Image (cartoon, rainbow, N blue to C red):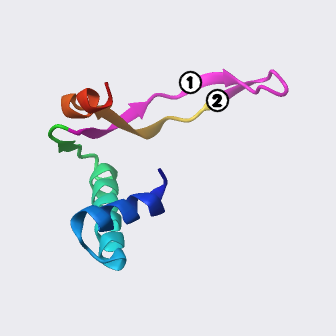
Amino acid sequence: MNKNELISEVAETSGLSRSDATKAVEGVFDAISASLAKGDEVRLVGFGTFSVAKRKASTGRNPRTGEPMTIKASTQPKFKAGKGLKDAVN
């Protein structure tokens, strides 16, 4: 399922117009992104938790040349599925 299919599904199940469903889905994505950018976590009970993980700088190898290279420290978004989502999938 891609973003447009998700918007269509939300519009169909909620009875919203497609433009309202688009605003709702975009609003959810924007709120989650903004919260993660501040370093907060977003906990949706029964669905899962979005959080930010900090990765340390490390040394790797360039796959083409085999030369060692430095990989910068970074922050990565992380998602951990909740019990409700796990049960729905299994």
Residue 74 horizontal side relative to residue 54, left or right: right
- First-in-chain label (2 vs 1): 1
Q: Secondary structure at mark 1?
A: strand
- Residue type, numbered disc 1: Ser
Q: Which residue is mark 2?
A: 70
Q: Are marks 2 and 1 in contact (CB under 8 Å)?
A: yes
Q: Magenta stretch?
A: 47-70
- In the image, residue 27 sits, relative to residue 85, either above or below, namely below
Where does residue 33 sit, x and y in percent of width and height?
34, 55
Q: Residue at x 35, y 60 (%)?
A: 9
Q: Residue at x 26, y 61 (%)?
A: 13
Q: Is residue 23 magenta?
A: no
Most frequent secondary structure within the magenta stretch: strand
Marks 2/1: CA–CA distance: 6 Å
> Picture quarter containing residue 85?
top left
Where does residue 52 sit, x and y in percent of width and height?
34, 39
Front residue of 61/30: it is 30
